[in-house]
Image: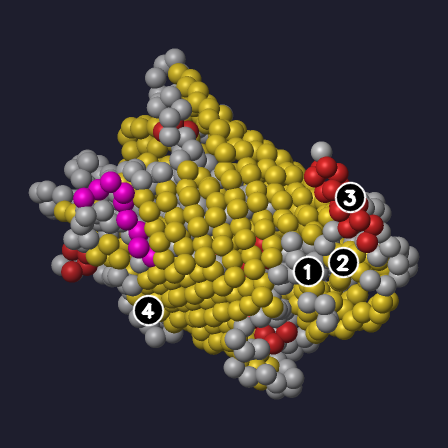
Amino acid sequence: MKSILSILCCLCISLSAYAHLGNLTGTVFDQTNNRPLQGVTVRLTGLNRATITNEAGQYRFDNLVASAYKLELSHVGFATQVVDVTVQNDQTTTLRTGMNVAPVALSEVVISSGRPHDQQLISNLDIKLRPITNSQEVLRLVPGLFIGQHAGGGKAEQLFLRGFDLDHGTDIGLTVDGMPVNMVSHAHGQGYADLHFVIPELIEGVDFKKGPYRADKGNFVTAGWADFRTRTTLDRSFVKLEGGQFDTFRAVAGVDLLGKARRSGTNNSRPQSAYLASEYSFSNAYFDTPQRFNRINLMGKYHGHIGAGTTLTLTGSTFWSRWNHSGQIPDRAVASGQIGFFGAIDPTEGGETSRTNLNAQFLTVTPGNNVVKNSFFYSNYGFELYSNFTFFARDSVNGDQIRQRERRNLFGYTGSYTHETYLGKTRLTTTVGAQYRHDLTGGRVPTELSYTRNRTETLQRVQYGDIDELNAALYADEQIQFSDRLTLNAGLRVDYFRNIYTDRIPQPATVGRARQAIVSPKLNLYYTANPRLQLYINTGKGFHSNDTRVVVPQGGREILPGAYGADAGVIFKPVPRLLVNAAAWYLWLDQEFVYVGDEGVVEPGGRSRRQGVDVSVRYQITNRTNGANFYADFDLNTARPRAVGVESGQNYLPLAPVFTSIGGLSLQTESGFSGSLRYRYMADRPANEDYSIVAKGYFVTDLQANYTRKTYSLGLSVQNLLNTRWKETQFATESRLQNEATPVNEIHFTPGTPFFARLSLTLFF
């Protein structure tokens, strides 16, 4: 009892010491459009105390001795601000600070101890320095993420990250403005993630992290996750026209609907904004068979205040695309001269897809500076794809073409509540959240896999049914900043899945059900020695769900195989203009997904483990306040992916990358010239389990050059500058050509883009 009383007395004395201290809060905004700036580093100079602004552009320092302070605010692409402020005893001082756009200066990048789990230093730099010229460049903003297109540009890209062949999104969670992109139990493959409904010019930023270390991230987040953020406002209306080789044409337009006065909140009104943007693309592409690729995008967005502390962001978009494609072709057909490098065995492959989205986001900051987020989303999605992976191996007369089709309604909710408090000098940031997602396919267009001929005739239905999949989750996240150097982040997440599959092939139809829950703990530790050096250890459990059509027949077993990961990393600035982020990582999966070439699907396999090293480097070669600035970036990624419980030499994971690198040089000038020269390299990798078949690597370079003035911008984009002949996607597939007696197992590939130049003109008004 005496010891308890002593502890209580010490606690009371400690708290009384802080009873008369002052507090400092503030909001940081973009001077151009009056919008809050997230991710601004705010430092109290001389005290080595720093934090990062939240989604509302807000920051807070508590328990400050009454005195005069200097506050330094820095953010990539903005001029550093130094503000003098005086804090009084028992009072909260409130500031509102605007920041002006300025050339990127790596010397101003600060490694913060305030919210290290939320730092996005690399992505903030890349979005400012690397132009996004097409929808594929959107994905390449994630360091180490490789993509491959094997269906004429209309199908979602094949993804590679951290020793994973992710297929189309099996082990990476992708969202846009918090709305899920990945499709569960998709007609073509689990986790299918098609980002083509995003107009590249409207990307404002991307938050990402590799590994399963965030409590607010659930399904598919094993290798990592990325959340793409679209612009809240358009500073200027614009029209952009592009034209290039291979009958390529693209038109984009964005119109600011309310004007600068409404964005700035003049005339005693709260700031609000709205814009409408559209895109049309057409290309016959570089294949021997014209692709006739068409895509239409339309997007509108409104942002405004609906209360003293609440903002509303409404986003609506619709997207439609249709195309032909040449599929994967076998090495032997090209070697024999039967077809050319850009030819096709089945020229009738192709597809059509669409997606319409509605997204309502509410952000509330309470009088006590608590942050409440609520988001409601809905998507109506359509998909139809014709493919032929094996040609005549199954059916020597009609061929092996398949159709995969679905029509889906997806709706859900995400919400969170964040509260900050102090216990002495220890800052506690508590977040609790809830998430709900419901996917429904069926009605007039059930989820389907059928054998077809010439894209017109259905020969046999293999799968034909309705999917009803529900995912509900709760999570809690605690960030404890013990001191200006040491921060601990701990989280716990619980996910519940309910799967229902109505099989329509038997008559009457049969209905099967399955359900399961999974618990995912997270623990992360950060030590920030100074604003130039931070060490961290990330650990956590994640998962990817399995397809409803797989888990229901198994009675619910293997629905949610876990993934267990750890990162040991460092972020440091050895010199002011050099930023390095390096990590050694490990990831164990309870269940691997394996590509099955004869059906063009993925199915669950055995256990696997991966380990490797990621290194990202950003360097500012010149540092001129006037004139030209050169920047260099470099990402290197190694991995050792292996199956567990399999004999050595037979345990390679097909198509998993083992060494990749991305990098380039960027130029920005005050005279209006800018550009970049970039490369990407993927080393040889195994195409099958014993490495007897090799997927050949490649090295490809791209060029981008722009000249921008106040009212217009001219651009030149060149993909594959050196006209390298390369294979963008490769599979070890057993197929039979029409004149062959037996099937052959070898590399089937989609040729990569040859030299491809495009010119663009953008008008601003």
* Residue ID for mark 2: 61
Describe residue 427's horizontal placement relative to residue 152 as left or right.
right
Residue 759 falls within the magenta-colored stretch: no
The foreground one among 119 and 729 is: 119
Q: Main secondary structure of the magenta part?
A: loop
Element at label 1: strand
Q: Which mark is residue 699?
A: 4
Q: Position of residue 612 (x, y in %)?
A: 36, 57
Q: Residue furthest front?
A: 2
Q: Earlier in the sequence, mark 4 or mark 2?
A: 2
Element at label 2: strand
Query: In 3D space, how far apart are the residues under numbered discs 4 and 3 (Cα atoms)?
Result: 67 Å
Q: Earlier in the sequence, mark 2 or mark 3?
A: 3
Query: In 3D space, how far apart are the residues under numbered discs 1 and 4 (Cα atoms)?
Result: 41 Å
Q: Earlier in the sequence, mark 3 or mark 1?
A: 3
Element at label 3: helix
* Residue ID for mark 1: 51
The quarter of the displayed image where residue 657 is located: bottom left
- Give the residue type that dot 1 points to: Thr
What count of labels does the image hold?
4
Query: In 3D space, how far apart are the residues under numbered discs 3 and 1 (Cα atoms)?
Result: 31 Å
Q: Residue furthest left?
A: 741
* Residue pictured at 75% horizontal, 62% vertical: 29
- Give the residue type that dot 4 points to: Phe
- Give the residue type that dot 3 points to: Cys
- Give the residue type that dot 2 points to: Phe
On the question of residue 694 being in view, the answer is yes
The foreground one among 31 and 467 is: 31
Q: Which residues are magenta?
A: 639-647
* Residue ID for mark 3: 9
Q: With respect to residue 590, does 213 lie above or below?
A: below
Is label 2 in contact with label 1 (beta carbons under 8 Å)? yes
